[in-house]
Image (cartoon, rainbow, N blue to C red):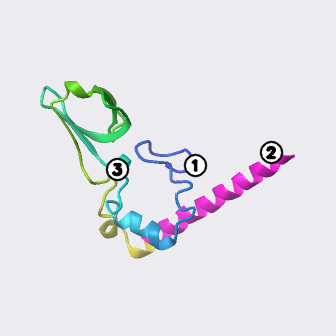
Amino acid sequence: MTRGEGGFFASDLTGYARGRAPGAIRDAILFPNRDLDPRNRTVVVTLPSGKTIEGIARNEDNFSLQLLTPDGSIYLLTKSGLKNLSYRNESPMPADYGKRFSAAEIDDLVKYLDSLAKENLKKEGSQEDEDED
């Protein structure tokens, strides 16, 4: 998702590149499981029926879990009612972009994310100017 449009499963990437070097952005694309934020890891639950559901936690506390799946379904689950709950130390983002895309395509994506961050920064700056008026 960028500029609030697109997919719903992952974070909005509009400002992702702000403060990040191009090499760090490239590494995040090519190696999504490196330095993985625990809040972005894949969650796997097994229901009492034996059905397994994978997704990302949108909200979680000691008693409940809201799980968002790639198809857009949201499951509101009580942890005590689950057969199993586990966390994978892997991102839901595919780890094979280095094979799917050429080096030039990865470069283009890095440049695009950088341009979005710069554009967003300019908008924020002009918004601050308007607020001062």
CA separation, marks 3 and 2? 37 Å
Q: Point out which mark residue 3 bears.
A: 1
Taking the view exactly as shown, the residue that stands out farthest to the bottom is 103
Evaluate if marks 1 and 2 touch, with contact meaning CB atoms under 8 Å apart.
Answer: no
Q: Earlier in the sequence, mark 3 or mark 2?
A: 3
Residue at the location (24% across, 49% down)?
A: 88
CA separation, marks 1 and 2? 21 Å
Q: Is residue 11 above or below residue 110?
A: above
Q: Is residue 14 above or below residue 98?
A: above
Graded by Cα atoms within 10 Å as few (under 14), some (14 to 19) or many (20 or more), the crowding at tag 3 reads few
Taking the view exactly as shown, the residue that stands out farthest to the right is 133
- Residue 51 figure quarter: top left
CA separation, marks 1 and 3? 25 Å
The residue wearing badge 2 is 131
Viewer-closest of 71 and 90: 90
- Residue 102 figure quarter: bottom left
Mark nearest the camera among 3 and 2 is 3
Kind of element beneath mark 3: helix
Specify start and end residues of the magenta stretch as a single range.
106-133
